[in-house]
Amino acid sequence: KKMKTTTKEKRIRKNIYLMIIFIILLLWNEAINENIKGVKAEKQKVRRTKSLPQLTINPNTITVSGISSGGYMAHQFQLSHSSRIMGAGVIAGGPFYCAAGNVATALGPCMKYPKLISTSVLEAFALEAELGGQIDPLKHLQNHKVYVYSGTKDTVVAPGVVSKLVELYEALGGVARLHVDMDEPSEHAWITQAWGNGCGVLGAPYINACNYPMTEKMLKTLFDDNIVVPDPAFRNNTDLFYNNLLEFDQDKYTFTFSEMNSKGFVYIPTACQDGKNQCDLHINFHGCHQSYDDVRLDYMLHNELTAFAEKNNIIVLYPQTRVSLLNPKSCWDWWGYTSPVYYSKLGFQMKSVIGMMNALMGV
């Protein structure tokens, strides 16, 4: 027979449930408080401004880079503005217009199944976009320097997809210098010498310590080997990086449908801050799950790019996407979630970033 639950037993169970709920709420409140403390401390260290400062920038040495969705974005930004950009570093990213405005294609062929990608089709579309004035004349690519990286253990964007990117560069007439780096056994991440997860780990903040000089190789490719390499201790000088990192109001440069964060960041090396020295400009696009909403300042402070920037007088613009219903993973738009012309100079994110670039240059 089924035993009846007594009033006393019901009261005990109720008290246990209430205790469990209380503990969960207590732990949740602790986590929220710790996060708020971290954000407050962070805001005390990072300078903030409404508008981007006008700096003295060499217009002939502007470069871009990015990882994953940011790699796709860096590549399409490079093609769209090839008359103003002189080089690109594409980390775990694929070829221009690969997704063709279709999220299923983005998640399938453009990440996992490279055999389904037709380089000739993408080449034809790029030529059509050039003819229609949606992107700059492709002849400018012949003067560009390009660094391409893919880890052999990448489980997110298959190395074969990255190989299709290399094929497209060649189909479009080639570039002045191309360094293809695809032999390191790393997972899907921005690769550093010493900071981050283990080399084979897939997870936040998507920076992996592989004892491999990826950032150095990329910058040497983009700047003809004319790069000062910071020592390991300097790469951990986060106090200096905090002081030179500037948060700005990104809303001033974005559009309603840009799906971009209200916060943007720019790293201004010490020697570039007063405008007396001409400096280089580099635009870096974070990957999915790497925006400020996701990892706060970790990506900008620890990707080694900031350390190299300080030593080589390279201003680094770090535009930011946001987490939203349309973009829950804070990816850059390389498949059309903001508009059908996302890949071109008319794309909302493209126009937003070029506006930031122009503001820094005073044009």
Image (cartoon, rainbow, N blue to C red):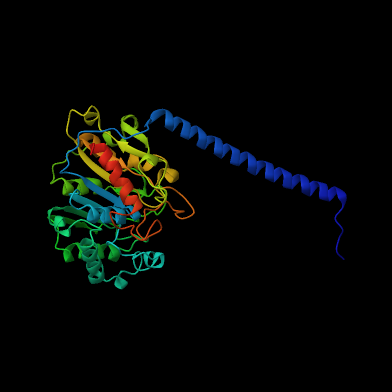
Q: Position of residue 34 (x, y in %)?
A: 52, 35
Instruction: Relative to 174, say whether 351 is above or below.
Output: above
Regarding residue 256, the answer to whether it shows in the image is yes
The one of 358 and 274 positioned closer to us in this rendering: 358
Taking the spot 37% from the left edge, 67% from the top edge, the residue there is 105
Q: Position of residue 267 (x, y in %)?
A: 30, 36
Regarding residue 209, the answer to whether it shows in the image is no
Dividing the picture into quarters, in which one does residue 334 lie?
Answer: bottom left
Q: In the visual, does 336 lie left or right of 355?
A: right
Q: How many marks?
A: 0
Q: In the visual, does 295 lie left or right of 243?
A: right
Q: Position of residue 279 (x, y in %)?
A: 19, 36
* Image quadrant where one finds the N terminus: bottom right
Instruction: Relative to 177, say whether 107 is above or below.
Output: below
Residue extending farthest front: 132
Taking the spot 15% from the left edge, 55% from the top edge, the residue there is 140
Instruction: Relative to 146, say whether 160 is above or below.
Output: below
Dividing the picture into quarters, in which one does residue 132 lie?
Answer: bottom left
Taking the spot 21% from the left edge, 47% from the top edge, the residue there is 63
* Image quadrant where one finds the C terminus: top left
Dividing the picture into quarters, in which one does residue 32 lie?
Answer: top right
The one of 266 and 196 positioned closer to us in this rendering: 266
Q: Position of residue 274 (x, y in %)?
A: 23, 27
